[in-house]
Image: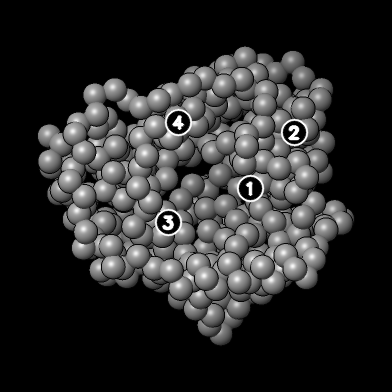
Amino acid sequence: MTWLSESGYRVFNPQRFQFPSPQVPILPTRLDIGSGDFGQGEYTPVTDSKNYQFFSWGRYALLEAFRLSNVGPGGYVLIPAYHCRTMLDPALSLQSEIRLYPLNAELSPDIPAIEALILESKLPIRALLATHYFGFPQSLDRLKALCNKHEIVLIEDCSHAFIRSRVDMKTGALGTFVVASPYKFCPTMDGGVLIGNGVELTRELIGRGLFDEVSSAVRLLTRARVRKHALLGTKSPLAEIIEKDGDHSWEDGRGISSAYDPASTSLRGYRLSHWIVRHSSADRIARQRRENFSKWLAGVDALPGCRPLYSDLPDGVVPYMFPLYLDRPLPDFYGLKNQGLPIWRWDSMGISGCAIATDYRLHLLHLPCHQDIGGQEITWMLETLEQVLKRLR
């Protein structure tokens, strides 16, 4: 494994393809405030009964976790090789060197490889970030013991696992710090959480002015009314098969991404966002997401050229997205994007020696299964997926 500053990033540039807008929202937008059963029902957020702060975005909550872990010059931080750019930006802004550690196929940490990285490090490793990908909790007991042994701060990334079953309260409990992104589960304009497990959080956050707060409320209400059901019956002609895999470039590994704003690092999340998070129904969100995830599993079972990353949905897991592995991202990814299928893909990623992360960068799609998606939209997405995968063969 090489240092990020030596290897840099491999970046996909979609601009020249002019993909149409997704016909189904990737994240929840519909306001449906319930009884606010967080902490009372079968499911609960990681913030339940915790000491936490509500930042504008999770990347800035992660920055504070790194700061409190003494991440900076003269020390290193370990971050998963499969990542989005904003998982790296906070450490880079602190001028810390990053090492990308390898993962297993199900995206669990490769413990022996991580221990080898620790033992060969010439400077102290100050923190390690561990991610619960797609809402599937990782067993972190061995990793926690390893961090304790080497005096490394364990930071749990619950950006994909904001809501958990009350049966599994370990998620978000082992890290000295926990970061999460409630906006990925609740229909808010922003929201990032920093939790201190036994650690006092003293960062003074800056609130928005009245104009900004009101403007955010107007934008949120406007977005909630804009739905794309009318477009779901429309099928664009399938694009001609693309023979070259897009427009990729290399970027220096020492710079932060355009998604990271140094001027916003101490910004508090919108008051309305925080209110919505606290008054949303965790049980309704969890059950609808589990139902939609199960529909995805059943729908892709017989499709050619793809497979789900996780073949079942264990009890209590609250999924963030449905991860689908494409055998041939060329041309399938482009065909799906041209049909308006809502897709996220972590294709702008630090270059590492991890074969899994390198493979998943282009092959693993993130498809929505959030609580706003109804039967009509699931049916449309599955039909579109089937049409493209069968047509482009």
Q: Residue at x 26, y 48 (%)?
A: 339
Mark 4 → mark 2, Cα distance in angstroms: 23 Å
3 or 1: mark nearer the eye:
3
Residue 74 at what x, y percent from top left? Answer: 82, 22
Mark 4 → mark 1, Cα distance in angstroms: 30 Å
Category of crowding for the residue at label 3, using alpha-carbon neighbours closer than 10 angstroms: few (below 14), some (14–19), many (at least 20): many
Q: Earlier in the sequence, mark 3 or mark 2?
A: 3
In the image, is residue 157 above or below residue 90?
A: below
Amino acid type of the residue that numbered disc 1 sits on in the rendered structure: Glu
| Number of numbered tags placed on the structure image | 4
Q: Earlier in the sequence, mark 3 or mark 1?
A: 3
Tell me the quarter of the picture where residue 79 sits: top right
Q: Which residue is mark 1?
A: 156
Amino acid type of the residue that numbered disc 4 sits on in the rendered structure: Asn
Q: Earlier in the sequence, mark 4 or mark 1?
A: 4
Q: Which residue is mark 4?
A: 13
Mark 1 → mark 2, Cα distance in angstroms: 20 Å
Quadrant showing the N terminus: top right
In what element is the residue under mark 2?
helix
Q: Earlier in the sequence, mark 4 or mark 2?
A: 4
Q: Residue at x 43, y 35 (%)?
A: 15
Nearest the viewer among 44 and 315 is 44
Nearest the viewer among 189 and 177 is 189
